[in-house]
Amino acid sequence: MQKCIPFKVNITKKNGRVKKMNNVLSLNKKGFALMYTIEPTLVWVSVIQGSLEALYPFIPFYFTSRILDLLLKGAINNQLIWYIVSALLSSFFVTTVASGLAHTRESLIYRAMDKKEMLLNKKIIHMDYQFVEDTKVQEKLSNIRMNEMTGGIGMFRLFNTTKNFVKNLMTVIIALLLIIPLLRSQSSSQITAINMDSSWIVALFFLSLLVYITLVLFLNKKAFKKYDEYIQGGVYLNNLVGAIFPILRNYNSGKEIRIYNQQSIYSKLFDESLNHSKKTLFGINYVSNQVAIVSTILSYLILSLSYVWVIVKALNGAISPGTVIQYTGALSLLIRELPSFLEELSSLINNSIGLQNLFDFLEMKGNRHEGTLPVEKRLDNEYTLEARNVSFKYPGTDEYVLKDVNITLTVGEKLAIVGMNGSGKTTFIKLLCRLYDPTEGEILLNGIDIRKYDYQEYLRLLSVVFQDFQLYAFQLGENVSASKNMEEERVRDALQKSGFSKRLEKLKDDLNTYLYKEYDENGIEISGGEAQKIAMARAIYKQAPIVILDEPTAALDPLSEFEMYTNFAEVTGNRTTIYISHRLSSCRFCDTIAVFDKGKIIQRGSHKELVQEKDGKYYELWQAQAQYYMKDESGLVQEVAISQ
Ligand code: ADP
């Protein structure tokens, strides 16, 4: 079973706490900076809405206490009216603006999430290709998604909790400011044996708050640990289920699932996934309930004692009767909101794991050398490619997939590469495209290491059809031109050369027909062979001087394949061509054939030369296929139907 590698906040045990705190602060700082870059209005709206929401509950306490004092004094004057009008207007203003901002904030969060998603997508399409294939990178991405989906951790949490954090922080600050006069007030008489103005009482009050804070923080940490266990334990399952769900929903896979009766495998996986979430969610709930119960009991205890304190102080004449409302209101808000504030604070601290995953991913840097040399533009297409002592291991692996490969492709030469599965043919193509750089040795273009060239310029020289090519749910013309601005005639010409023109004639929307149905319900479904022809047309359209075709006829029917071979010279013209095929008879169009075996080129020559080497690999492969071929009158090898 594949092991998941958790990407935790990087903390060494030594100086652990300080480092952790610094890390938490710097990650949150980076997170807020990113939030501000993505959607600055969201930050402002969150701060304003949070502040107004914090202010709102204090308005009645503050003004009622003033109004009550004036009433008790019998002062029915302008000041009294002013307090009443201010209380009403400020409540009205705060409620209206805050609720207006609440709607704005909700839509801004959606926008910010979309923008953050785009940021991830951009990173994926621009990162070095080696990362795209790297399972650890895929795991990192899966962690980010899982964090967001199950606990709203990462940027999602910042987008959502900033308002609440500001609200709770402001509530605590305003409440503390409002109770300062209570702490400093002096009694004119004492009705109790204990001196209620004593600094010991004030110290006791803050001490009980401290105990309360510590306990709530401790329990929050425990709850988060449980949550983290859940996330980490679920990464592997999530990856698996995430990879399998799209397959299950794809109607093409429905065939195999039924024929091979695979339902039970998937049902077992679903059960496992559901059991995992049930078990851990119960665990999380248990700890969360503990936090809620303990903090409620403690808060009521502290609040009751504080009420007694305030009332006794009022009876002692230290504070006016009206301000009892202000102090009890402020104290109850302070004590009630303190756990929420701490919860928001812990959630920001714990959010560091999500942010760490995100920034690890966004800041991932490739080590591909970025050359700056411009590629010489030659009308005569005089480009020579040479692999010199090229060896290659995939990153993170120990085995050489290519070993000491030497080959030169002269201008206009047509090279066929043949060999068993896994012998390194596609990997060699990936190296030519600089999707990876050789571990040892170099690849030269006109005598200069390809790493030295500007990569985009170098890529312009290559037209490639990969074995696992991909078409997109865009219009046909866009798929061929790989652009929104196609040259229509060039697209038609490419489609005609790749053998797609008959199908094109039948398309109602011509080149504007959508492939597949994701974007357009009138989009067309295409067969594997048709898809291969479109992919081929895309390579032809590019008109690059070097053409690389990896099994370009694998999905074609015999007639289409024959057509492709007939057009082969026209399609590739005087371009330098590399052609990978398992069908050896098709390699006869090529000047040279290189035989790959276990990452090495073990033979090279023309077809005629290689079939003479009776103890060679090529002869062995040829013999294995020859029973399906015969010579026609002109001496050409043709495929024949297998007789009964
Ligand atoms: P061929 O095209 O000749 O069938 P490939 O070049 O695709 O062979 O693969 C050569 C070897 O490299 C195989 O053993 C394959 O498992 C391995 N390989 C291919 N891609 C990767 C990758 N991304 N990471 C690690 N190994 C890989």
Image (spheres, grey):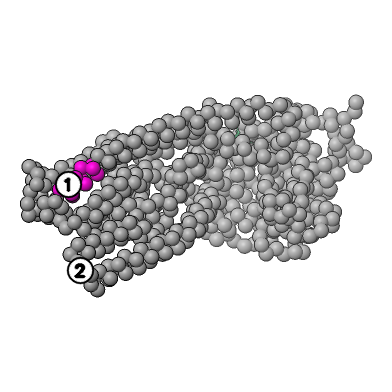
Percent position of residue 323, x then y? 20, 57
Residue at 79%, 50% in the rendered image: 568
Residue at 68%, 51% in the rendered image: 518
Name the residue beneath numbered marker 2: 75
418 to 99, vertically: above or below: above
For label 1, being within 8 Å of ligand 1 is answered no
Which image quarter has ligand 1?
A: top right
Q: Quadrant of residue 283?
A: top left
Amino acid on which disc 2 is placed: Ala
Residue at 48%, 40% in the rendered image: 150
Query: Would you say 261 lies left or right of 316 here?
Result: right
* Of marks 1 and 2, the one in the foreground: 2
Percent position of residue 42, x then y? 43, 60
451 to 602, vertically: above or below: below
Name the residue beneath numbered marker 1: 309
In the image, residue 286 lies in the stretch drawn in magenta: no
Label 1 neighbour load within 10 Å: few <14, some 14-19, many 20+: some
Residue at the farthest bottom position: 78
- Cα separation between marks 1 and 2: 28 Å
Region rendered in magenta = 302-312
Query: Would you say 89 lies left or right of 449 here?
Result: left
